[in-house]
Amino acid sequence: MKKKIALLSLSSLLLVACGEQNTKANSTDQPEIEELENQLAEANKRIEELESELEGANTNQESSESENKGDQQAFGLNEEMVIGDETTDAISLKVTEVTNNISAFPDYMQNLTDEYDLNKAIAVTIEYSNLAYGATFAPSTHDFQIFNASDGAPFERISQQSGGDEVTEGRSGTTQIYFYYPEGIDNVDEVEIDYSNQGNYIGTFNTEVTK
């Protein structure tokens, strides 16, 4: 985008230059005006080429991301997502509960009714294991994005997380994360939970919401 803006600025400058030259033009200035017009035409042509390249790159990126998601298996409730390479299983995740039941939320969130409208929120419980990560591991709420499975509408992350202590190899832990849906949970029966590790999309959990 920066290159495109720069070229558009150059085009504008050339237009101004042509305008200034035209106001002062006489028969001896004609070659210079024609040269500026040629430069402007070349700049506009290059802008069009870059716009076409940018559109192609965006299309390829969206297609690649879609293919990556399409290639991934969706994991259901209590199904374990094991992440690693061809030789080593590094970590695993399992969604054990997705609920709108207010009793599932921590007491402090239940008591802060002015800050948290839990009638429009879900609590997601996740079990995780450090199999052979090579360092301590714990998932963060920021590693997850949640969508209404029926229409793809996104949930809003609540910046709270329970549990989630980092564990060493061979150890497991549990965490609970919270998301808010402004339209209300009444018409949300199922959610898709995307997990990313270090900014890279890994896979999706597809689970029902208990109420």
Image (cartoon, rainbow, N blue to C red):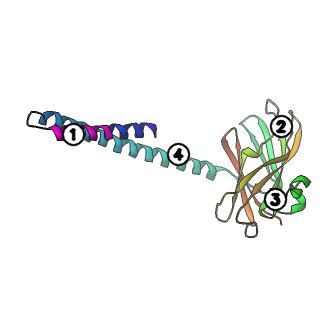
Q: Residue at x 63, y 50 (%)?
A: 69
Q: From the viewer's perspective, is 28 left or right of 12? A: left
Q: Nearer the viewer, mark 1 or mark 2?
A: 1
Report the residue marked by disc 3: 114
Q: Main secondary structure of the magenta part?
A: helix
Is the residue under label 1 in contact with that under label 4 (CB below 8 Å)? no
Q: Amino acid at mark 1?
A: Glu
Which residue in the structure is indicated by mark 4?
Answer: 61
Residue at image mark 1: 37
Q: Residues within 10 Å of mark 1 (few under 14, many from 20)?
A: some
Return the x and y of residue 56 as percentages of the image width and height: 44, 46
**Sequence order check, earlier mark of 2 and 4:** 4
Q: Earlier in the sequence, mark 1 or mark 2?
A: 1
> Residue 37, image x and y in percent?
21, 39
Q: Residue furthest bottom?
A: 187
Name the spot of residue 67 as percent of width and height, x first.
58, 50
Mark 3 vs mark 4: give the one in front. Answer: 3
Magenta stretch: give its range.
12-24
